[in-house]
Image (spheres, helix red, strand yellow):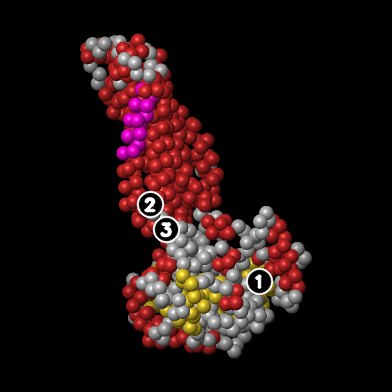
Amino acid sequence: EQLPAVRATGNLFDVLGARPLLGRTLHPTDSAPGAEPVAVLSYGFWQRRFGGDPQILGRILQLSQGSGGGPTRVVGVMPPDFAFPTASVDVWAANPLDPAGPDYTTPYLLLLGRLTPGARGATAARELQATVAALCAERPGCDENAARASARVVPLREALVGPVRPVLLLLLGAVGFVLLIACANVANLLLTRAAVRERELAIRTALGAGRSRIARQLLTESLAIAAIGGAAGILTAVWGSGLLRAALPADLIGAADIRVDVRVLAFAAFAVLLAAVLAGLFPAFGATRANLHAALLDRSTAGARHARRRVLGTLVVAEFALALVLAVGAGLMIRTFANLCGVDPGFAGAGVLSVHVSTPSATYDDAANRRFWRELLERVDALPGVQSAGGIHLLPLGGSNWVGPLTIEGAPLANGEPPRGIDWRVATPGYFEALRIPLLRGRLFDERDREDGERVALINETAATRYFPSENPVGRRVRTLFEGNDWATIIGVVGDTKDTTLAGPARPQMYRAHAQRPMGAMTLMVRTAGDPARLAAPIREAVRAIDKDVAVSEVEPLAQVTADSIARPRLLTALLSGFGLLALLLGAVGLYGVIAYGTAQRTREFGVRIALGARTGEVLGLVARDAIRLAGIGLAVGVAGAMALSRVLASQLYGVAPLDPLVFAGAAVLLAAVALAAALVPARRAARTDPMEALRWE
């Protein structure tokens, strides 16, 4: 079984201030050379794999990675609310720190530190830079510029949730906008009902009911409406939380723990109370200030009617302003998602199956890994329907990346010049053919690149252009921190691929031959002419035939991996579009209510106009003009809000300007069309007014 695991030094849990549910956490002595391999399990893995066995402490697990591989003793279980660095981690294994070991100088660990009380990040950064410089000075061949560049102080919360914080804040804002629009609609409803009940409320007042009593009555009605809506919303949330968890990207911190709990219920109750007060406050205030004499005669004054229409119109303006903000946000994300879908990743993913294969490090050395992959590729190539196959140690667009400073022989960096950065990969022969990555110069890896041969490497077009702008890089020698002191000769230049994200330019990349830099965990890429999923079972059988202890996981078409890489913008697009459509619907309902109410109040006026010869089109125009005026003011106000939102959304956009005129114009036209549609029914009703009935109205 392939487990998501973390290799950690013995003091990790002390730095995090985390305590175990059972047993103990890792201890600094667990990282000492020769220490017994130990591990701590997650609560979920303990329950899922061992049924919550209380006797789990002391059990021996055969881990092929983690603490160096081999038998590993379980020393603790973490509580269910502990998740670091993500909720998917099942095992935290002690990482040995042996100065004589082969990995001691390889930069594969992330450093975490707890600041002393009152310390600032800038101070810690200066101290870290000084420490790194001192350590580098003690080690021959250390590149101080590269070491300093890698030493940065970043708050842990920012490192974990920083990339998704803007997305979550945007969604929270969108939900708030929809809630405000709903409040405006309910306020419109209550204002209209208060106008209809004006005489009733006046009679209550005449009989001795105070203003506070009338206000409490209307606020109570508002609370009843909000409570019913809130209960329906909570039931919908309980039903939909599972769908939301399934739709969220797997790398989103806390996504697996989304559920309706006490905190969500408390927030929902507060939102319901706030919505009820917001929606009921204006109607209650207006009802208590009504003209008692006119209300008792059931005759509202022209001033009162005008004031009421002005309040109703103001709420509709606010609705359309908020709706425009959401419509612009949705439009920007729709264009972004369309642009991302049109990006060429540099490889042909259709028809390719990706299979993660991990050999057990306890029994596989470099020679065994070479033999395993050579035999596996031979077996897979012989399967019916396979066109080509190869391996890569980091899946394209899989979310992982190895980056290191690049040193070019004969081209030292000038003082103060930043280090050359390059992404680092290990590939087998056949990988570039399987993904149809073009060869631009030189040759690809083949059987000549053996363990005892000259060390070779491939670079991509971006690396060749950036670091060898005026020469052919084939034949030049380079090395990275992953090479140690060995130089590798560039034998070819291949096309650019998007290995980290579809957005942004291609990055410099370097590939090493698997035979010369064997890796135990690799992803097999298999191209077939038919459905790639049909090869899953034969490939599992091929691996099992070589060694049943080799883990196979993450079997999926490469096209699905590419689609998953844009899961976050796809989700943001879907949610913003949904909120935008809901806002449009609510805005249309609110405008319809206001126009219908205003039309009913002007029935006698329309009857007089029709009696004096007004044509149907003129009456329709009068009503439509009111709707367009309200919507136009709302759109004008909403443009400012949409411009502010677009700047906040800028970090999530790709291939579209934050102030894209096409999106702004399209959103405005859409809302104007919605306004006209909402006014159509009241306008047609006004145009069909019977003059005799209207003139008999009073």
Q: Is residue 3 visible?
A: yes
Q: Is residue 509 visible?
A: no
Q: Amino acid at mark 1?
A: Leu
Q: Secondary structure at mark 3?
A: helix
Q: Secondary structure at mark 1?
A: strand
* Front-most of residues 72 and 104: 72
Which residue is rendered at x = 52% and y = 78% of the image? 38
Q: Amino acid at mark 2?
A: Val
Which residue is rendered at x = 52% and y = 52% of the image? 165
Magenta span dominant secondary structure: helix
Image coordinates of residue 508 in percent, x first then y, are: 60, 67
Marks 2/1: CA–CA distance = 49 Å
Query: Which numbered marker is on residue 257?
Result: 3
> With respect to residue 444, does 681 lie above or below?
above
Query: Which numbered marker is on residue 406?
Result: 1
Identify residue for label 2: 260
Q: Secondary structure at mark 2?
A: loop
Which residue is rendered at x = 44% and y = 87% of the image? 375
